[in-house]
C-alpha cells in the first residue's frame, strides 16, 4: 500500500510503498477515506516540542521512530477484520478514535486511555492515516457517526474531542460569566461551536488574525479580541465583565498563557491544550491568593468522543469550516498550516 511518511524531520513527506497490514484477533483494517490535518502533526514533523528557555523535548526520545506515518484524524471503511471481530462488517464506515493506550494500566482501565503512560496512539506512536490503510487494534475504537457529514466529523476525533474535554474541565460557567478561547484555528473554532452546544452563554475569542476572528464570529462567538498593541489584559477583563471564569487555550504559547492567566477572575480556571511551546513564570503565592487553577488537558477519552458525536447528531454543534484536497497534497497542506494560511480545518481525501 501507499503511505506518506516522515523519513527525516522537517523534510517533505515521502511517498513510499509499505506492506498492507493483515488484521489478527480483535484488529480491524480500515481503508482511509478521509484524514484530517492537525497542528500536532507539525510538532511530530519537526521532531520536537519547544520547552521553556529554548529547550526541546526530542520525540525520538519519547518513542517516535522513523520512518513514520502520521495522521490521527481518520474516517474510513472496514476493509478486513480479525477472527475475533463481531461488531463491524467489511464495508462499514466509521470514525476512528486514535488515542489508544496500553489497555492495562489504571488510566486505561478507568476509560482514560488518552492519558496512558505507555500510549499507542494512531498516527503518533503507531502508523496513521496518511496512507491507503490503517490498522486499528480493536473494533471498540470505531465510532458510528450516523448521518453526519464525514468531512465535518473527521476532525472530531482530535480537535473536537480535545476541546470538548477541555471545556468540560472549564465548566461550570455562570450565565453572566465568560469563557475565553485563545486562538481561532481549527481547535478554537471547534471550541466555540462545542461551548455553545454545551450552553455556555458568553464566549469570547482572542486571536491576532482578524480573518480568523471573523470565522469565530460566524461560529457563534459573542465577542472577539485582537490583542494588538493595546493593554490586552485590561481589554480582555473589560470585555468579560471583570475577567473570565475560565480560559481554554488552544494555542499554548507564552503570550496566550500569560494573557489568559492574568485576566482570570478570582477562582478562575486556565485550561491549556495547545502545544505551541515556551514557558511561563508564576509567582506561587498568587495561585492560592487568587484561588486559580492551571490545568493541562490532553485530547479526550472515548466516552467523550461518543458524547460529542451524539451532540452533533442532535444538531447542536455548528459544523466547522472544512476544506478538502487529495491525500497526495499532505506535504503542501502541512506547509500551509505552518504558515497560518488555513482557516478552519483541512481534511484529505483518499
Image: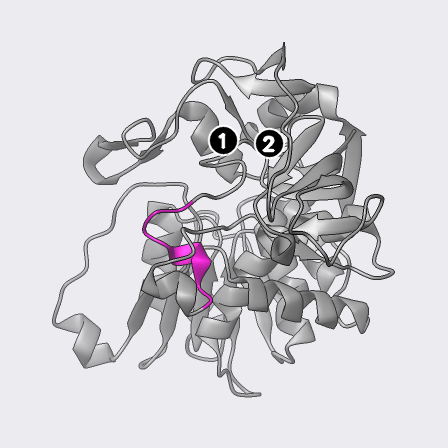
Task: Work out whether residue 84 or residue 222 is closer to the camera in this orientation and state it.
Answer: 84
Give the Cα separation between the discs numbered 2 and 1: 8 Å
Task: Work out whether residue 308 or residue 261 is closer to the camera in this orientation and state it.
Answer: 308
Task: Work out whether residue 350 or residue 210 is closer to the camera in this orientation and state it.
Answer: 350
Q: Residue furthest front?
A: 83
In the rendered picture of this protein, how many numbered marks are placed on residues?
2
Give me the disc on residue 42: 1
Q: Compared to 228, does 236 lie above or below?
A: below
Residue under label 2: 337
Q: Which residues are magenta?
A: 111-119
Where is residue 27 drawn, in percent x and y? Answer: 61, 44
Q: Residue at x 30, y 72 (%)?
A: 293
Mark found first going from the N terminus, 2 or 1: 1
Residue 18 picture quarter: top right
Helix, strand or loop at label 1? It is helix
Asked if residue 250 is among those painted magenta in the image, a careful observer would answer: no
Amino acid at each position: 500500500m501507499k503511505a506518506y511518511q516522515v523519513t527525516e524531520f522537517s523534510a517533505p513527506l515521502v511517498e513510499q510503498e509499505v506492506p498492507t497490514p493483515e488484521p489478527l484477533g480483535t484488529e480491524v483494517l480500515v481503508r482511509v477515506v478521509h484524514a484530517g490535518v492537525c497542528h500536532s502533526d507539525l510538532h511530530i514533523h519537526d521532531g520536537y516540542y519547544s520547552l521553556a528557555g529554548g529547550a526541546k523535548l526530542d520525540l525520538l526520545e519519547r518513542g517516535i521512530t522513523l520512518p513514520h506515518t502520521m495522521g490521527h484524524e481518520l474516517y474510513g471503511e472496514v476493509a478486513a477484520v480479525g477472527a475475533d471481530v463481531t461488531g463491524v462488517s467489511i464495508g462499514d464506515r466509521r470514525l476512528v478514535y486514535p488515542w489508544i493506550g496500553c489497555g492495562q494500566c489504571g488510566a486505561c482501565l478507568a476509560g482514560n486511555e488518552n492519558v496512558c503512560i505507555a500510549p499507542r496512539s494512531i498516527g503518533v506512536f503507531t502508523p496513521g492515516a496518511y496512507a491507503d490503510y490503517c490498522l486499528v487494534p480493536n473494533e471498540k475504537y470505531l465510532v458510528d457517526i450516523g448521518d453526519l457529514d464525514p468531512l465535518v466529523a473527521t476532525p472530531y476525533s482530535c480537535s473536537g474531542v480535545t476541546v470538548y474535554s477541555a471545556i468540560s474541565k472549564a465548566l461550570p460557567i455562570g450565565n453572566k460569566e465568560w469563557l475565553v478561547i485563545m486562538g481561532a484555528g481549527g481547535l478554537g473554532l471547534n471550541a466555540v461551536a462545542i461551548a455553545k452546544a454545551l450552553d455556555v452563554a458568553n464566549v469570547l475569542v482572542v486571536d491576532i488574525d482578524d480573518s480568523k476572528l471573523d470565522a469565530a464570529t460566524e461560529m457563534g462567538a459573542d465577542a472577539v479580541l485582537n490583542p494588538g498593541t493595546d493593554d490586552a489584559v485590561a481589554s480582555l477583563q473589560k470585555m468579560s465583565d471583570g475577567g473570565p471564569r475560565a480560559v481554554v487555550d488552544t494555542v499554548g504559547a507564552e503570550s496566550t498563557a500569560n494573557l489568559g492567566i492574568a485576566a482570570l477572575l478570582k477562582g478562575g480556571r486556565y485550561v491549556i491544550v495547545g502545544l505551541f511551546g515556551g514557558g511561563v513564570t508564576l509567582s506561587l503565592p498568587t495561585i492560592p491568593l487568587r484561588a486559580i487553577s492551571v490545568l493541562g488537558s490532553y485530547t479526550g477519552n472515548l466516552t467523550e468522543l461518543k458524547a460529542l458525536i451524539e451532540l452533533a447528531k442532535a444538531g447542536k454543534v455548528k459544523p466547522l469550516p472544512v476544506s478538502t484536497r487529495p491525500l497526495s497534497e499532505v506535504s503542501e497542506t502541512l506547509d500551509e498550516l505552518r504558515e497560518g494560511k488555513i482557516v478552519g480545518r483541512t481534511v484529505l481525501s483518499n
